Amino acid sequence: MSQRRKVTVVGAGNVGATCAQVLATRDYADVVLVDIKEGLPQGKALDINQMGAVLGYEPNVTGHNDYAETAGSSVVVITAGLPRSPGMSRDDLVATNEKIVKDVTEKVTAQSPDAILIVVSNPLDAMCHVAKSVSKWPKQRVFGMAGILDTARFSTFISWATGSSVKDVQATVLGGHGDQMVPIVSATTVGGVPLRKLVSEEEIQKMVERTAKGGGELVNLMGTSAWYAPGAAAAQMVDSIMLDERRVLPCTAYLEGEYGIDGLYMGVPVKLGPGGIEEIIELDLSDAEQQALRASSEAVREVVGVLTT
């Protein structure tokens, strides 16, 4: 009988399986992989367990088609839903994924009433609203993964442009997860040096643009959504919660007046700990950044307006 705590990942597709794989290698929790497709979660769990024999972690990943085994999870990561295909905007997914996220949220919350919910399904900001409204849980325990991924993309481009280690890049991306995201260039540094001292404004704008369209770039190349970076980004959030790291990470949180935005899920820096979102960090934004964030929030509100819940 395992004494380790449990993390459930719903959706054994590429993102969910990558998240489960990264968590398994971290070696502090048992991982339950759930998917509607028979054999898929069982097979991926088996494969990840067998990888433990090579990499040397203690594997305890199980795959299931029902939710009984998820009972008592500390954290649940929801990746279920259709991925984007070429030419499809995130918003096109609203109707289909709303039904899926609603159904999944009902099932996981019944089994793990004290869990923390991390939503990864697209369109992300809208799906957070669905999970919050269905679970009726406090906003501290229902939030989304987006900013870490957007920041990772931005950081990668900065590292390439400056010829620096990505470990020394500190980037911040706020706002909706989509073309309206707002990279905060004023708060972006390489080894403590402001980005604007290292790269021309024109080059920065190119990187900002590529970051905002980063998901679409991958969809166009592969014919489906990305999964390595998103899966790892979701796992990083689980680490901060489960290991009591209290890291400041950009997450999609429910705002009630912060940044002048009310009643909306938006990407902002938060402190993530055992209780979920322990604090929302308010950065000093320039007027232009504040304006961009407002435009981003209006775009998110539009998508949320399409929801039936």
Image: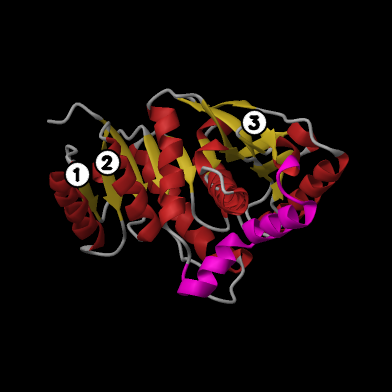
Image quadrant holding the N terminus, namely top left
Residue 22 higher or lower than 99, as above or below: above
Query: Mark 3 or 2 closer to N-term?
Result: 2
Q: Which residue is mark 3?
A: 192
Q: Which residue is mark 1?
A: 55
Q: CA distance from mark 1 to mark 3?
A: 35 Å
Residue 121 higher or lower than 89, as above or below: above
Q: Which mark is residue 287?
A: none
Q: CA distance from mark 3 to mark 2?
A: 31 Å
Q: Are marks 3 and 2 in contact (CB under 8 Å)?
A: no
Q: Are marks 1 and 2 in contact (CB under 8 Å)?
A: yes
Q: Which residue is mark 2?
A: 25
Query: Mark 1 or 2 closer to N-term?
Result: 2
Q: Residue at x 57, y 49 (%)?
A: 163
Q: Amino acid at mark 3?
A: Gly
Q: Amino acid at mark 1?
A: Leu
Q: Nearer the viewer, mark 3 or mark 2?
A: 3
Residue 85 visible in the picture: no
Give the main secondary structure of the magenta stretch. helix
Q: Amino acid at mark 2?
A: Thr
Q: Nearer the viewer, mark 1 or mark 3?
A: 3
